[in-house]
Image: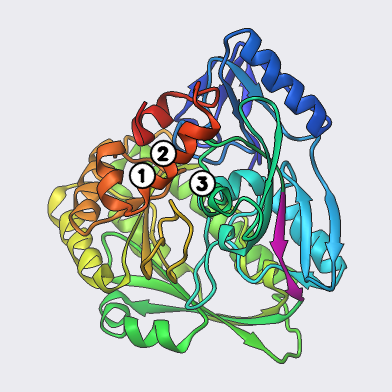
């Protein structure tokens, strides 16, 4: 899998291949000062500015016809503070590099998503999350931010410094400024024991509250056209470390989950009638297994099959009903859905536009193989999600607008008022932000 978006003939494309843009110019600043100068020059030229990381968003949140900022030279760890147990990292650092660097220092983030190709700034700005009973999104682990604002000045924020900016900018959608550095809370590296096993969907739904309560991190994948799921339970362990063997890891994570799955997706795209049979085979391909390793080796997985994704956060108590409605819709629709549906959870947090802001949440993610028509499936799924007061992931396909979000987020006006103050001329505006935040 290419971890970055592509650029050919002046056209930028995201990883999913569903978004393209032609920026007037691209800049890769090597310092915060160069970035500030680029923002000021864009203002002189009457151009908007957007930063893009690895292009893993499926929305046009980073698309621009103005100045495209690529932060690949703004990478690395600035500082590790072992007294405060924090790490300050440059915004363009890929999560993979951060995780590996922290592990070498005997440190770790508390929780993370299952893909680590994103840059840290892209991941937090869109609300990337994993699954957790008590531990929340990556953005909820932020203790400080540095960003370049619309006039080119550098602003820092934390709970004590510019707290109103901090409350919003942890998931800022690129609307408040360009993030240049992030300070994360860290802890001594620990071990997780992962237990992965197939389980009937009806059992998962019937026992969901119990499975959630008994495990620090619980998630599952439901295979449409079947009654089967694959579940994963991650819990802290005293050890000993028992990682997946190289051979077993290659067979499960590369050959089956990526290689064979890729071929199955090609077949399903070419001959949609085969999808239900492929789903039944896929749902039984992975066997139960258990292993113990450091966090990023348990939380994350390689994703080499390209797809397009929609994900909504619904109130956690609405999850089982939402899943039952989604299954009933697929069963009666005639749709052919070749990708499993991913389900995770997060506790309530206090970030202004976090999808878990103010409420315990469950995330339901639907995917389609890249190049396969996805609109009918996503439209039907979105109808179900919004009926349950769902909040879409900011970096994944959705059709919601500012009017919807003003009802979905009690503190929506706080964010837009802060945006008016920090970016009155809309230097960081694009079509996506115009839709979701208003003019």
Point out which mark residue 416 bears: 2
- Would you say the residues marked 2 and 1 are in contact, meaning their CB atoms lie under 8 Å apart? yes
Magenta: main secondary structure equals strand
Q: How many C-alpha atoms fall within 10 Å of the one at disc 3: few (<14), some, or many (≥20)?
A: many
- The magenta span reads 182-188
Sooner in the amino-acid sequence: mark 1 or mark 3: 3
Residue at left 84%, top 73%?
A: 83
Q: Report the residue that reaches farthest toward the left.
A: 332
Q: CA distance from mark 2 to mark 1?
A: 5 Å
| Residue 350 against residue 9 in the figure, above or below | below
> In the displayed image of the protein, which residue is found farthest to the top?
45
Q: Is residue 174 magenta?
A: no
| Residue 184: in magenta span | yes
Cα separation, mark 1 vs mark 3, equals: 18 Å
The answer for how far apart the CA atoms under marks 2 and 3 are is 16 Å
Q: Label 3 belongs to which residue? A: 126
Report the residue at 38% width, 58% height from top: 340
| Front position among marks 1 and 3 | 1
Q: Secondary structure at mark 3?
A: loop
Q: Which mark is residue 413?
A: 1
Residue 283's quadrant in the figure? Answer: bottom left
| Quadrant occupied by the N terminus | top right
Q: Quadrant of residue 312?
A: bottom left
Query: Residue 331: where, in percent of width, then height?
Result: 17, 57
Left or right for 98, reference 268: right
């Amino acid at each position: 899998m290419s971890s970055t978006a592509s650029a050919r003939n002046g056209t930028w494309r995201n990883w999913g291949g569903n978004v393209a843009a032609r920026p007037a110019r691209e800049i890769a600043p090597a310092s915060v000062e160069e970035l500030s100068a680029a923002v000021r020059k864009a203002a002189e030229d009457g151009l908007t500015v957007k930063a893009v990381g690895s292009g893993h968003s499926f929305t046009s949140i980073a698309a621009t016809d103005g100045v495209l900022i690529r932060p690949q030279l703004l990478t690395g760890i600035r500082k590790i503070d072992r007294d405060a147990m924090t790490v300050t990292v440059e915004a363009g650092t890929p999560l993979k590099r951060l995780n590996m660097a922290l592990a070498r220092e005997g440190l770790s983030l508390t929780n993370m998503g299952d893909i680590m190709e994103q840059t840290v700034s892209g991941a937090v700005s869109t609300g990337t999350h994993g699954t957790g009973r008590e531990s929340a999104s990556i953005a909820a682990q932020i203790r400080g931010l540095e960003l370049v604002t619309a006039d080119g000045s550098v602003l820092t924020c934390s709970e004590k410094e510019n707290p109103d900016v901090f409350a919003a900018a942890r998931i800022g959608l690129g609307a408040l400024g360009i993030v240049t550095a992030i300070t994360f809370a860290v802890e001594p590296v620990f071990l997780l024991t992962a237990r992965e096993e197939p389980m009937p969907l009806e059992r998962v739904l019937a026992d969901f509250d119990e499975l959630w309560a008994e495990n620090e991190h619980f998630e599952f994948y439901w295979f449409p056209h079947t009654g089967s799921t694959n579940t994963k339970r991650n819990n802290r362990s005293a050890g000993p470390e028992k990682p997946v063997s190289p051979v077993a890891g290659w067979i499960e994570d590369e050959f089956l989950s990526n290689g064979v799955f890729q071929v199955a997706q090609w077949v399903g795209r070419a001959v949609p009638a085969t999808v239900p049979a492929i789903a039944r085979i896929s749902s039984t391909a992975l066997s139960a297994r258990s292993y113990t390793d450091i966090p990023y080796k348990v939380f994350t997985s390689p994703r080499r099959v390209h797809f397009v994704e929609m994900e909504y956060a619904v109130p956690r108590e609405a999850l089982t009903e939402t899943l039952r409605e989604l299954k009933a819709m697929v069963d009666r629709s005639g749709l052919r859905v070749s990708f499993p549906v991913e389900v995770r959870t997060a506790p309530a947090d206090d970030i202004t536009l976090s999808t878990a802001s103010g409420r315990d949440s469950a995330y339901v993610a639907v995917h389609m193989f890249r190049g396969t028509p996805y609109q009918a499936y996503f439209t039907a799924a979105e109808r179900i999600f919004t009926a349950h007061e769902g909040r879409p992931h900011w970096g994944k396909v959705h059709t919601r607008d500012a009017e919807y979000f003003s009802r979905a987020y009690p503190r929506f006006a706080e964010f837009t008022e802060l945006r008016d103050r920090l970016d009155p001329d809309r230097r960081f505006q694009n079509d996506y932000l115009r839709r979701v935040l208003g003019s």
